[in-house]
Amino acid sequence: MVDQARARRLAKRISQIVAAALEHEVKDPRLKMVTITDTRVTGDLREATVYYTVLGETVDADPDTAGAAAALASATGVLRSLVGAGTGIRHTPSLAFVPDQVPDEARRMEELLARTRESDAEVARLAAGARPAGDPDPYRVPRERTDEE
């Protein structure tokens, strides 16, 4: 039986251990700006997928994602050992590092929303001076009854 609560707790603990190890123990300069965003553990607790984001030094600089991926791949054994020591479970899960797509998707959504706002502003500007194409009041008015009817 799969205990989802245990898998979530283990995933959270793995995230904490890996983040602390990247900050304090692994001395690779390519991992300086790596942030652990999420961890998912399979139901049998044998495999863990660790999602990470690489932040740029400045706003204009592109982050070195290839260097960070290579550094994480070379540090996987050390990190797995630290996870095993920090969790104390019988079988230490194997670690797979995957770049997180959420920041890129969020950036793309922000660009789409900005374009939509600009388009809405243009439509509002055009509608401000517009006149109706047909009658000013296009709705039928009920005819008034006379006394003869």
Image (spheres, grey):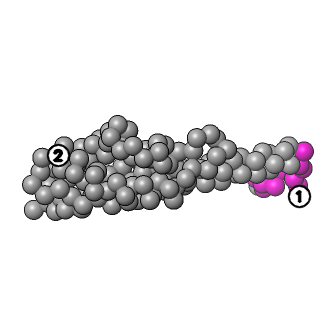
Mark 2 lies on residue? 85
Which sits in the foreground, 98 or 119?
98
Q: Is residue 95 above or below residue 136?
A: below
Tell me the distance, in whole angstroms, between the alpha carbons under discs 1 and 2.
78 Å
Classify residue 56 as left or right of residue 132.
left
Q: Tag on residue 28? A: none
Residue at 28 percent of width and 56 percent of height: 77
Which is nearer the N-term, disc 1 or disc 2?
2
- The quadrant of the rendering that contains the N terminus is bottom left
Q: Residue furthest top?
A: 24
Q: Is residue 29 visible?
A: yes
Nearest to viewer (mark 1 / mark 2): 2
- Give the x, y percent position of residue 95: 29, 58
First to last magenta residue range: 129-148
Residue 71 figure quarter: bottom left
Label 1, on which residue?
134
Which secondary structure class fits the magenta region best?
loop
Q: Let me know if residue 148 appears in the view.
A: no
The residue sitting at 89% across, 57% down in the picture is: 133
Magenta-drawn stretch contains 24 = no
**Which sits in the foreground, 4 or 140?**
4
Q: For the point 84% across and 44% down, which residue is it?
A: 125
Label 1 SS: loop
Give the residue drawn at x 17%, y 46%. 85
Q: Position of residue 19 (x, y in %)?
A: 34, 42
Q: Quadrant of the C terminus?
A: bottom right
Q: Is residue 149 left or right of residue 14?
A: right
